[in-house]
Amino acid sequence: MVRHATPTGPGRLDVDSLRADFPILQRRVHGHPLVYLDNAATTQKPQAVIDALVDYYSTTNANIHRGLHTLAEEATAAYEDVRRRTAAFINAGSPREVIFTRNTTESLNLLAYSLGARLGPGDEIVLSDMEHHSNLVPWQLAARRHGARLRFLSVDDDGRLDLDEARALIGPRTRIVSVVQMSNVLGTINPVAALVEMAHAAGALMIVDGAQSVPHMPVDVQTLGADFLAFSAHKMLGPTGVGVLWGRKDLLDDMDPFLGGGEMISLVQREESTWAALPNKFEAGTPNIADVIAFGPALDYLTRVGMDAVRAHEVETIAYALDRLNATDGLTVYGPPDPEERGGVAAFNYLDIHAHDLSTILDGEGVAIRAGHHCAQPLMRRLAVPATARASFYLYNRPDEVDAMIDALGTAAGLFGHAPPTGTGVGAGAGGRGARV
Ligand SMILES: *Cc1c(COP(=O)(O)O)cnc(C)c1O
């Protein structure tokens, strides 16, 4: 039915044959071949994922868990099978520790609501200045509801967190530490293990926003050591509308539900109810059955390619992109200079051209990048910019797509009356070669 990815050799991707699995990569935009560099926002889907959606609705569609007819049994089995594969993908101790939500945002809201209920005045929640709004606003709501206080780890000039500051900030009042593992703007890979140690030493819970890390590097929850991990299927080749919350079973067992309704109950009486066992307690109502089932082939695809190979490919790609961007006069890249310290994302500003204009001009050349605050307004304030452009890569991106972006930046420079970039990199302009924040 579908063509399969064929990784070749240890740690090396055969990108051309991978690309053949993604039909959208064949299309043209404004007369140019599509160069899709907006993978931090959402990734493209291989044919196997698209087929699984059509297949499910064509052959199996039924509501799960309740029915005793064949379709309902098959749909339930397929849905629960993907829960098992998701657990295996992150090496969870049990599939019961995997809750399906709508997205990372909902997973984090679930935590802020259910864990938030235990907070009181004087309790502290520690976040960082590079959090996505979805790992900030839910905690603002929880803090306001329960009189708790938010504290923030700052971001240094190279886009890193400062562990000494973390050591000073995480203390006896800390109840929750919630930090992004890989920044969707700076690309920074944060030292989660060290933060876990500090959080646990203080008796606090550690939550990891894995929306960027789980799709782009091997993540094993048992070695990670955190208590909760949130991520989204759509950023790892899967469909939109499926999020994952992994949590330690004893902690999830202790928590109150987030949403109430069908499926999540055991016994319902007029005045009160008891809750279903995990994971159903946290999956109220009819879930996104089709998209969860179609997430299965996405997990298989990444497993077949190998997350080590995905990561190695992205280090290579971002290293090349940083070289080319840093060699462009008048261009400033944000985040850690060392490709090994970051994911495949490069946020930048160029000359006096607003990021939105850059994005529009690049789109005219078929190059899809993002522009704006990337749902990280406090970080934009830290960088002292209103917005940035952002190119973000995945397993199907090639070096010539980086070249296409650099060429399109030259077009933008010309349109704004600048000389085209020399690309020598010697004495580079505003940003310099240091890729400083
Ligand atoms: C995309 C993203 C989110 C939010 O994911 P949704 O799927 O939009 O809920 C949260 N954190 C980071 C770091 C992200 O990149």
Image: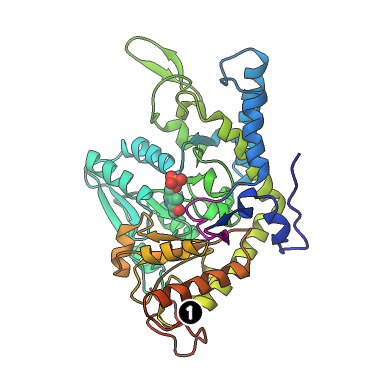
**Residue 290, x across and y down, in percent:** 58, 31
**Residue 410, x across and y down, in percent:** 47, 76
Q: Is residue 264 above or below residue 158?
A: above
Q: Quickly name the residue at label 1.
A: 326
Quadrant of res 170: bottom left
Residue at (34%, 64%) from the top-left corner?
387
Residue at (63%, 39%) from the top-left corner?
50
The kind of secondary structure the magenta stretch mainly shows is loop
Residue at (47%, 61%) from the top-left corner?
363
217 lies left or right of 125? right
In magenta, the rendered stretch is 30-43
> Which quadrant does the C terminus fall into?
bottom left
> Toward the viewer: 228 or 104?
104
**Residue 204, x across and y down, in percent:** 38, 48
Q: Residues within 10 Å of mark 1 (few under 14, many from 20)?
A: many
> Toward the viewer: 17 or 242?
17
> Toward the viewer: 264 or 3?
3
Q: Is residue 139 above or below residue 378?
A: above
